[in-house]
């Protein structure tokens, strides 16, 4: 797809007058410092968009793509600057957007990529005060060795390297003071933004249910005791797995705002993606993909934050999964309601069956009047890799697919306007796009259809890693 058109798709579609009116109606609800910053960010970019649209009217057609690209670059730089200075949900959302924003110009992607880097850390004295409050003493007394300078800082906490009194090297995650309040403010602001987005773009979008699901998951992420239980649970389940690694929990040094696990050596994303041979990237990409499929379809609970900063990569292609703060657990009947739509797309390739399944699961309201083939053509876009025998994920494919999905004025406008996202699908959708983006950055090629059928229909293993996992499952069942 033409890069300028992708930018226009991402930026366009919202009438300027409607945006201004919506901002005016919602402004009185945004009272906190963080919310005011987000309102100003939104207002600045609405004004910038209005100016771009006006200039497009008097700009020759051959220069409009350049104008759109300039708009995208300035907007990306503005968003990255604002979100990069904030902790909490907004930075986390910004990180996810930055990793799947393949339809934007390179300069805009580079601006957003700054959100992938470590956030500004808190002062050593603040981190020490949290450790003392949670573990009953300053870190120099609780641990044999404590490194003041964090090795990583993210949206709600930072990680310090330490050595326990019995000599174990550990990673200690310490939550930022005030993170809970920041999360609540972010989610209140997110509800306003999602409501505005729903009102202007997706008529059938249930913004409140969408935000409620996000709020529930994000609140869980604030309590490191829940994450500790998640880590212990995933570690037990994947014990002895041939290529999935989960760090061991240190429960006696973990509390609600401090989480301690074994230290894991390995390459970070930047090192791995820039230096590893393609064969190793191929293997690691398949590991990440299979970890997600197994968790979603067999385990019934899955890591909802497929951010490359949450992985450590190893020379044999195995991957250590570090962060289990955001874990979605299927409630009884949730996955059973969603999976028929996936099977209708991938297994049966049946438009009529797809529409019927989407109506039952809440993606479409009865009486929508849409043509099933039109629905299938749109909804199947992210699943193209599973409709052919072999496929290579690329950044270009991701960019084109995202542009098609968000083209609310394009050929699929009627379908988009009537689609809803059931709350059950919110975190799963995040995983679908996040994993696809990672595979695109690694240029991984595989028989994805045959691999997915392993999980959907019990088909035989399609790759070496699939066979290794099958052997592990057989051994675990004995």
Image (cartoon, helix red, strand yellow):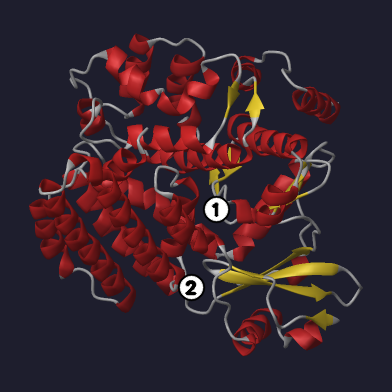
Q: Residues within 10 Å of mark 1 (few under 14, many from 20)?
A: many
Describe residue 21's horizontal placement relative to residue 257 as left or right.
left
- For this rendering, which residue is in front, 323 or 65? 65
At 91% from the left and 72% from the top, the residue drawn is 167
On the image, numbered disc 1 is attached to which residue? Answer: 326
- For this rendering, which residue is in front, 146 or 437? 437
372 w.r.t. 63: above or below: above
28 w.r.t. 246: above or below: below
Residue 32 position, x and y percent, is 29, 76
Describe residue 210's horizontal placement relative to residue 315 as left or right.
left
Element type where label 1 sits in the image:
loop
Q: Could you tell me if residue 184 is visible in this image? A: yes
Q: Could you tell me if residue 216 is visible in this image? A: no
Give the quadrant of the C terminus. Answer: top right
At 59% from the left and 18% from the top, the residue drawn is 449
Q: Quadrant of residue 466?
A: top right
Residue 92 position, x and y percent, is 48, 59
On the image, numbered disc 2 is attached to which residue? Answer: 179
């Amino acid at each position: 797809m033409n890069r300028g058109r992708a930018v226009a798709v991402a930026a366009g579609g919202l009438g300027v007058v409607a945006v201004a009116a919506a901002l005016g109606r919602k402004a009185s609800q945004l009272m906190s410092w963080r919310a005011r910053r987000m309102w100003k960010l939104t207002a600045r970019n609405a004004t910038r968009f209005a100016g771009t649209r006006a200039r497009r009217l008097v700009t020759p057609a051959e220069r409009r793509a350049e104008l759109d690209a300039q708009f995208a670059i300035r907007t990306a730089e503005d968003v990255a600057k604002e979100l990069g200075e904030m902790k909490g949900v907004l930075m986390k959302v910004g990180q996810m957007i930055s990793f799947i924003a393949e339809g934007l110009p390179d300069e805009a992607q580079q601006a957003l990529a700054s959100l992938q880097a470590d956030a500004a850390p808190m002062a050593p004295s603040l981190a020490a005060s949290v450790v003392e409050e949670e573990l009953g003493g300053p870190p120099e007394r609780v641990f044999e060795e404590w490194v003041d300078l964090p090795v990583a800082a993210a949206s709600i906490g930072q990680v310090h390297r330490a050595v326990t009194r019995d000599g174990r090297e550990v990673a200690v995650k310490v939550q930022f003071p005030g993170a809970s309040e920041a999360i609540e403010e972010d989610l209140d602001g997110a509800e306003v933004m999602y409501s505005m987005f729903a009102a202007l773009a997706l008529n059938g979008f249930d913004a409140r249910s969408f935000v409620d699901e996000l709020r529930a998951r994000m609140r869980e992420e604030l309590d490191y005791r829940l994450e500790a239980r998640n880590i212990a649970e995933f570690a037990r389940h994947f014990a002895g797995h041939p290529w999935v690694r989960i760090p061991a929990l240190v429960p006696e040094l973990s509390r609600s705002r401090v989480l301690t696990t074994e230290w894991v050596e390995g390459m970070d994303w930047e090192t791995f993606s820039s230096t590893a041979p393609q064969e190793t990237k191929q293997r690691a990409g398949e590991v990440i993909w299979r970890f997600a499929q197994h968790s979603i379809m067999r385990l019934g609970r899955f890591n909802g934050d497929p951010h490359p900063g949450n992985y450590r990569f190893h020379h044999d292609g195995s991957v250590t999964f570090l962060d289990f703060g955001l874990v979605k657990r299927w409630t009884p009947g949730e996955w059973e309601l969603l999976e028929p739509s996936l099977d209708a797309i991938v297994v049966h390739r049946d438009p009529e069956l797809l529409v019927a399944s989407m109506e039952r699961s809440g993606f479409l309201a009865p009486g929508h009047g849409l043509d099933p083939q039109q629905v299938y053509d749109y909804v199947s876009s992210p699943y193209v890799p599973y409709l052919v025998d072999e496929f290579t994920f690329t950044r270009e494919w991701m960019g084109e697919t995202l542009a098609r999905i968000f083209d609310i004025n394009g050929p699929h406008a009627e379908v988009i306007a009537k689609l809803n996202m059931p709350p059950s699908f919110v975190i799963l959708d995040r995983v679908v796009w996040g994993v696809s983006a990672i595979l695109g950055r690694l240029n991984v090629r595989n028989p994805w259809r045959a691999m997915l059928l392993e999980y959907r229909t019990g088909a035989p293993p399609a790759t070496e890693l699939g066979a290794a996992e099958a052997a592990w499952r057989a051994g675990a069942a004995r």
